[in-house]
Image (cartoon, rainbow, N blue to C red):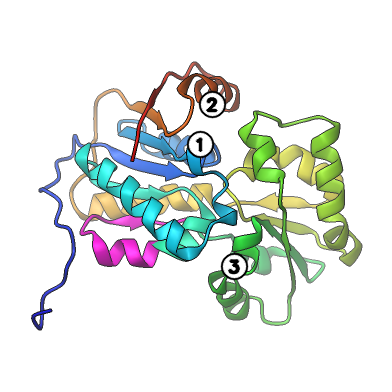
Amino acid sequence: MIAGRTNKSISPPSRPSDPIGVFDSGVGGLSVLRELEKLLPHERFIFFADQAFVPYGEKTPAELIDRTSRITRFLLHQRCKAVVVGCNTATCYAIGQLRQRFSIPFIGVVPAVKPACEQTRSGVVGVISTPATARSRALRDLVRRFAGAIRVIRIGCPGLEEVVEGGGTTGPVLDAILKTRLAPIRAAGADIIVLGCTHYPFLRSRIAKIAGARTLDSGKAVARQTRIIIESRNMLRASGLGTATFYTTNDPVRFARVASKLLRRRVVARAARV
């Protein structure tokens, strides 16, 4: 490599009318899209669900970098002016490589460890996430940086993401999983639980009830950061009707059914191969 140069993929100049890309392994990122649409009502969004490869929590870092790079190229082909990585696991393991490979701005999802540690009164905070996020260096670094004397209990929750992918937000199977996974957090006396997977905000009421604690996620913070970034680049779409277009690498009919339930509006999806 020639000194001073990079091998970044250079995207064409962006316009305010260009869309914002949002992707996740599945429907979890819809919780982030929901917050983005509230704060940026005039923007056009393209949501990409990589459901043929869900769950990301069981993928290797190399697999995550490969999948997220492929998705980014697809979104660049749609002229996206920024990309929101609507997945905690992908943010932990791939966003650094994406920023090195592509010139477009990326906004990641970071578990809300800092505000949880600032707001706890019991001195105990729980963090629930995919197993991959629970054991990630990124999460360990967050805890090391912000917890101080606060006790942080990290719990990986295999199976929970898949329940939401099927559209499950209530029921005995869900409650059984939550009671098992949340037991150590409840026993320790945590008063705040960080939702460290974007699928989990759709389960907020059940998690709060079973754990006896309030919940925090980073959806609103991601939306605020996205607005800051596109405003700083003079790329804010200040008028016009906001829209969202949906793609999935699996069955678009099934995705649309679940997404319609979670977003409480009619969703139509398209199939995509990347």
- The residue where tag 1 is placed is 30
Three-letter code, disc 3? Lys
**Are the residues tagged 3 and 1 within 8 Å (C-beta)?**
no
Image quarter (top left, top right, bottom left or bottom right) of the C terminus: top left
The residue most toward the top is: 266
Of residues 19 and 4, the one drawn nearer to the viewer in this rendering: 4
Is residue 96 placed above or below 76 in the rendered structure?
Answer: below
Comes first in the chain, label 2 or label 1: 1
**Quarter location, residue 125:** bottom right
Which span is picked out in magenta?
95-109
Instruction: Quote the CA–CA distance across marks 2 and 3.
Output: 30 Å
Of residues 194 and 61, the one drawn nearer to the viewer in this rendering: 61
Residue drawn 59% across and 55% down? Answer: 58
Q: Position of residue 165 (x, y in %)?
A: 61, 35
Q: Position of residue 224 (x, y in %)?
A: 41, 50
- The residue where tag 2 is placed is 259
Looking at the rendered structure, the secondary structure element under dot 1 is helix
Looking at the rendered structure, the secondary structure element under dot 3 is helix
Three-letter code, disc 2? Ala
Q: Residues within 10 Å of mark 1 (few under 14, many from 20)?
A: many
- The residue where tag 3 is placed is 114
Q: Position of residue 258 (x, y in %)?
A: 58, 25
In this view, the mark in front (2 or 3): 2
Comes first in the chain, label 2 or label 3: 3
Is residue 131 placed above or below 72 in the rendered structure?
Answer: below
Is residue 105 placed above or below 210 in the rendered structure?
Answer: below
Of residues 43 and 98, the one drawn nearer to the viewer in this rendering: 98
Mark number displayed over residue 165: none
Instruction: Quote the CA–CA distance across marks 3 and 1.
Output: 23 Å
Q: Residues within 10 Å of mark 3 (few under 14, many from 20)?
A: some
Residue drawn 52% across and 47% down? Answer: 219
Residue drawn 65% across and 56% down? Answer: 129
